[in-house]
Each structure stands twice: as structure tokens, then as C-alpha cells.
Image (cartoon, rainbow, N blue to C red):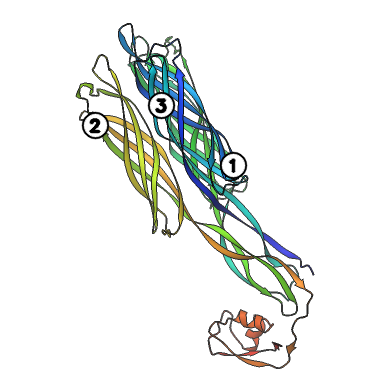
Amino acid sequence: MDLDLIKDYIEYEQSIAENDTKMFIKEEYVIPDTLPDVDNILMLDVKPMITNKEVGTDKVNLEGQLQYTILYMAKDGGATEAHSVVYNGNIFESIDMIGAQSNMYCDIELNIEHMDCVIINERKIAIQGFIICKCNGYNINSFEIVKDVHEGKDIQFLKNPMTVDKVMEPIETELVGKAEVKIDMDKNECLKVIKYDVTIGKKDVRIYDGGLKVEAMANVAILYKGKNGRDLFCVSESVPLYKEVTVDELKPNMEYFTEFEVQSFEYDVRQDDMGENRVIDVEFVVKAITHVMYKEEVEVIQDVYCPTKLLNMDIKENNINVIQGHGYTESLVKGDIDVKNDDLKPIKVIMTTGNASITDKNIKNDKIEIEGLLKVDVLYSTEDEEQYLVTVEDEIPFSCKVDIAGTNPNMQANANISLEMIEGSLEAGNVSIRAIVKVHCKVYYNIKNKFVVNMAINDGEVPEKKASIIIYVVQPEDTLWSIAKKYLTTVDEIMKINELAEGEEVKPSQKLIIPGRATV
């Protein structure tokens, strides 16, 4: 016989698969006819971008683009001068990830581990190196449970409150940044843009009732070649980003974290009121991906029986992903780059760029210890007539910790990092680096729990009760619930006949009057 069941859904995030893959990149390009021959490579800047991803069984198919900006030195008419060229490459990669499923979400992060540009001949160069692809796959699972029964007065329920971590589908927001980057009169006007760099900092994301507000400050740095000379110059501009979106399900008490990534960047050099190329119009798109989670308390049936009917129950065990907590930390990273060649000592830092990555994470009690690496590229000028521009690279290790109460080494953690700010300056003839990185960690663990997913009345006969009242001696493992279920009575009846107060617990060796018992 069917019962009129009241059902509910348990929703939770479950990490399914994780994998770090090293991809080998090798490309060859020919210098355009409009540019002079390559003498030596000064700088290689690589910007990776994911354009498409498809998750299949035990694998992820990734498509992306790589933008290569090559700054090189050339001898043109006896003088040494810097030139730049931009190439675009494609990524097509199938990444093995055991446990991946076609319906799951997958966060992918691309980090340049090492990339070199070598000269094949004066008109041809080769780019080769490695990209680390970090994949994290997860599902937002849902299953149905029995919460109660309509008009089930005879049915006895033992319910316990349970806190469930619920997650929403990631909220993607596009923020458009626009600015006029003006070149001061103490710098040469712009002949050609060499490269650009965008760093997102001062991030402020807030959830309110029914909506989401995203704010950030983008620092745009543009390296350009000046007119009437061979010098390179760098100009920068802080561009505010702001967007509000309506999401009806959002509530102020929900927890969240947001990742930012630059999707596109366009620029146009134009003349100012004096007819000089001193204005660079920039427009770019930043995607903000907000992950929202919240805790919800639900009453879960632990046990059920009926004194007058036999019940059939379908009980299933599920692994539930429980979020212990998440947190942020900002860390100041400092280091000095030793310029070893005394003949090429820097006289001015022109541009400093970098990227940060996490190399290791360790979960301790109440904290996650993070080890990271800041990779830095610095372009500076010298007094040397031939090598008037020099680039240096360095890797600065750093460590920090993220405090999350209740964590322990048996739990798991996801961590991501962003570079909020970087600058280089001259100190005692060397290049001093100062940067701010922001680390986010989420700690979780799995628990197994049993849930009643279906229930029906069994048409079989219920054991008859004897009319006589018996005296029962409470055993150490007994509860009022277990005693009532054993003798097919109710907790209320036992409490009433024994004059027990609300919430009073029974004790071993205590004697109880049972109003009839089942024949066994």
C-alpha cells in the first residue's frame, strides 16, 4: 500500500576528479617581411586563454589560445634597436582525468611553467616550453529523501537535524573596462604598442538579498616604442570595474568566493588635441566567476516504525561532501634580483610583470600552509650603447597560511592564487621586487550517511500484543525510542504511564511499565 509521502532534496557539491597535467608546447614562426632580422631575443611574453572545454568519461578536451609577444633586438643600418612581433597559437589537448563525467563542472587553470624563444636563423624563431594545466572536476549532486508522511498519525518518526552544505551553479559575470591612457609630455609619443599587462586588485564582491555586486580595480600597463628614437616607455592606468547582477536565490548570509580572469584586450593609438599620438584607448573584458555556498538545516529521518502496521523502507547510503570552511589571506612577497653583469647595470626599470602559482599545500590543525612561487620578468635600460635594453627573470619563493577553524590533516583542500599587484624598483644597483598575492582555500571532507528514500505499508500481519502490563528493566544501550519500537508502542505512551518529564532520559537498571508487548 502506498503512503502519501512528503519528500525533500539533499543537494551538495562533490569533488570527483583532480589532475595536474604538463603540456609541451613547440611552435615555429617566420619574422614578417616588414621587420628586420633577429639579432637576439630580449623578452617573450605568453598569455594563455581557454576558449572551450568539454568533459567526457575520464577525460577533459581542452581548446585554447596562446598569444606570444616577442621583443627582440635587431641591427638596422648599423644601430641596435628593439622590435616586437605578436603571434597566436592554438591549444588542442585531451587530458586524462580518472573519474570525470560528462555532466560535471570543471575548473581549469593554465600556468606557464617555462617558455623559451630561440633563434633558428635571422628570419625564423622557435617557441617551446611547458604549460601546467590544473583541472578540478566536481558535481552538484541531488537526491530525494522522505521527510514525512501525510496523515500518518500512527507512524513513529525519529528525526535528527542535519546541516547540509548546498551550492549554487557558478555565477559568471562579465565586467568591461574602458580607459584613455594618456602619455605625459616627458615621454616620447607612441609609435607602436609592444605589449600590455592587466593585474586585477582591490576586489570587492558582495552578495545581497536577490543580487550580486562585483567591484575591482584593474591596473593596465602598456609598453610602447617611442617616436623619433629607440627608447621604450611604459604607461599605466587604474581602471575601475563594476557590475551588479540579479540572482533571485541569493541571500546575504551565503558564503562565496570569486575568481577573475582577463578574457580579451583591445587598444587603439590616437592623436591628442595637439596632433600627437599620446592617447591609447583600451577596452577589455574581465570574467568574474562567483562560487556560492550555504548551509541549510534539514530534519532527516533516522528511524521509523508503526505500532499497527508493518513498513517497508528503502534506505540508501550516500557520501556527502561537507565544507569545513573557506578563507583568504593576502601576502606581501619581496625579493631582490641580483644583476650580475656590472657592464649592464640598470639605470631605470621600464616594466615589471609576473605571475604567481601554488607549488604545495599542507592541511594542518586550523590552518592551511601554502608554498608558492612568484615568477618575475623585468625590463630595464642601461648606459650601454648596444645593449641599452636588458631583461632579467627570477623566481621568488614565498609561503603563507590561511586560517580556517576546525581543519585537520585528514581533510582535503582546494586552493587558488591571484597576483594583485607587482612593482620593481632600483635599490643599490639591483632590482627590488614587491608584490601582493591573494590566496583562497576551501577545505572539505566526506561523510557517509543513511537516508530513507522511500516507504510503503507491508500488507503482512503485525505481531499481536498481550494485554498484560510488564515491567521492563532498562539496559545500558536502551533509549525510550528503542524500547517503544521493540514493544510496538510509542514513546509518549511510555512517558505518560511512567510519569516521565519531557526530555527525561532513562537510565540502566531503571524499571519501566510497558503497556503491552508484542508476542515473540
Identify the secondary structure beneath mark 3.
Answer: strand
Examine the rendering and report whether any part of residue 282 can be seen.
Answer: no
Instruction: Give how far across and how far down residue 478 sits, in percent.
Output: 57, 82
Q: Nearer the viewer, residue 237 or 373?
A: 373
Q: In screen coordinates, is 434 left or right of 483?
A: left
Asked if residue 221 lies left or right of residue 207, the reply is left
- Determine whether 25 is above or below 227 in the image: below
Kind of residue at badge 2: Asp
Q: Which mark is residue 338?
A: 2
Q: Which residue is mark 1?
A: 55
Residue position marked by numbered label 3 in the rendering = 45
Give how far apart the Cα atoms at labels 2 and 1 are.
45 Å
- Mark 2 Cα-neighbour bin, 10 Å: few <14, some 14–19, many ≥20: some
Mark-to-mark CA distance, 2 and 3: 21 Å
How far apart, in angstroms, are the residues tagged by discs 3 and 1? 30 Å
Q: Is residue 236 left or right of residue 205?
A: left
Residue 420, compared with residue 302, is above or below; it is: above
Residue 497 lies left or right of residue 423; in this view the side is right
Tag 1: amino acid: Val
Image location (x, y in percent) of residue 52: 57, 34
Total marks drawn? 3
Density class for disc 3 (Cα within 10 Å; few <14, some 14-19, many ≥20) is many
Q: Nearer the viewer, residue 65 or 207?
A: 65
What amino acid is labelled 3 in the image? Asp
- Residues tagged 2 and 1 counted as in contact (Cβ below 8 A): no
- Marks 2 and 1, the one that precedes in the sequence: 1
